[in-house]
Amino acid sequence: MAKIRITLVKSPIGYSQDQRDTVRSLGLRKMWRSVEREDNPSVRGMVHKVRHLVRVEEVEEGGEQ
């Protein structure tokens, strides 16, 4: 399954608690840190909710043997 890299590019301070909780549930703790998650509808929904705070890139899977 494809993966996406999610990077926190803007601080969630000053946004609703629900949006801050979504950022935390994605695994993002500090600015400019990235996490890789499976590309599925639930993760895409969370990303859509905080799309103004994150940057999303598709990760190529070329290193598997």
Image (cartoon, helix red, strand yellow):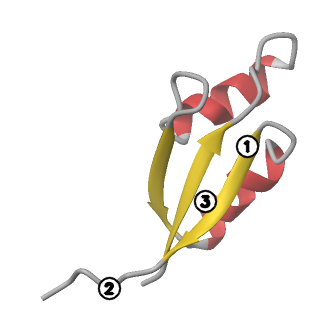
Q: Secondary structure at mark 3?
A: helix
Q: CA distance from mark 2 to mark 3?
A: 22 Å
Q: Residues within 10 Å of mark 1 (few under 14, many from 20)?
A: many
Q: Is residue 17 left or right of residue 4?
A: right
Q: Secondary structure at mark 1?
A: strand
Is residue 21 positioned above or below 3 on the image? above
Mark 2 = which residue? 62
Q: Residue at x 54, y 58 (%)?
A: 5
| Residue 24 found in image quarter | top right
Mark 3 = which residue? 43
Amino acid tagged 2: Gly
Q: Is residue 61 left or right of residue 14?
A: left
Q: Position of residue 40 (x, y in %)?
A: 57, 73
Question: Closer to the N terminus: mark 2 or mark 3?
Answer: 3
Q: Are marks 2 and 1 in contact (CB under 8 Å)?
A: no
Count all numbered tags in the image, as a single digit: 3
Q: Position of residue 14 (x, y in %)?
A: 87, 11
Q: Is residue 55 left or right of residue 43?
A: right
Amino acid tagged 1: Val
Question: Closer to the N terminus: mark 3 or mark 1?
Answer: 3
Q: CA distance from mark 2 to mark 1?
A: 24 Å
Mark 1 = which residue? 54
| Residue 4 found in image quarter | bottom right
Is residue 19 positioned above or below 36 on the image? above
Q: Secondary structure at mark 2?
A: loop
